[in-house]
Amino acid sequence: QVQLVESGGGLVQAGGSLRLSCAPSGRTFSGYNMGWFRQAPGKERDFVAGISWSGDSTIYADSVKGRFTISRDNAKNTVYLRMNSLKAEDTAVYYCAASRLVRTIRTRRYDYDYWGQGTQVTVSS
């Protein structure tokens, strides 16, 4: 069974940093565009950042632009989300996802085919 596994979440003070990692088990996702989404309690699952299969292109939600960086290492079959200058409103469960639609980086959750179980990020103010 294909699965994406996130790690690196935790509790951090406002202004701090975390790096999330996402690695698949069962297959490689080097030919897939990858994305990070997040879901706060009582809210929709929102797009955070996406990266093309080659790593050459990235896009970000306006709320995280300039603070978060998505990257990937296809040799290690791992995608990262570096989060700096964290704010209380960044508190959410963060999900990694893979999309077979590679012409453009997608921002809708429905365009992603595989998902991880999520990792909790809590930012204390």
Image: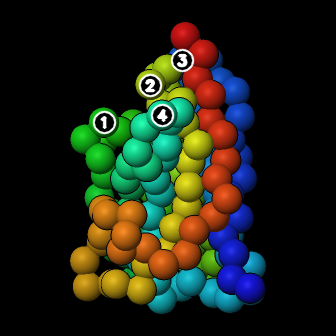
Q: Amino acid at mark 2?
A: Glu
- Cα gap from disc 1 to disc 4, whole angstroms: 18 Å
Q: Nearer the viewer, mark 2 or mark 3?
A: 2
In the rendered image, the vertical position of residue 60 relative to residue 115, given as above or below: above
Q: Earlier in the sequence, mark 1 or mark 4?
A: 4
User: Foreground residue, 55 or 8?
Assistant: 8
Q: Which residue is mark 4?
A: 42
Q: Earlier in the sequence, mark 4 or mark 2?
A: 4
Q: Amino acid at mark 3?
A: Ala
Q: Is residue 106 visible?
A: yes
In the rendered image, the vertical position of residue 110 relative to residue 29, given as above or below: above
Quadrant in the rendering for residue 55: bottom left
Q: Which residue is mark 1?
A: 63
Q: Earlier in the sequence, mark 4 or mark 3?
A: 3
**Local crowd size for mark 4, using a 10 Å CA cut-off: few (<14), some (14–19), many (≥20):** few
Q: Secondary structure at mark 1?
A: loop
Q: Which residue is mark 2?
A: 89
Q: Which residue is mark 3?
A: 14
Proximity of marks 2 and 1: CB atoms separated by less than 8 Å: yes
Q: Amino acid at mark 4?
A: Gly
Q: Residue furthest front?
A: 42
Q: Residue furthest top?
A: 125
Q: Earlier in the sequence, mark 1 or mark 3?
A: 3
Measured from the top left, where is residue 51 in percent x and y? 39, 67
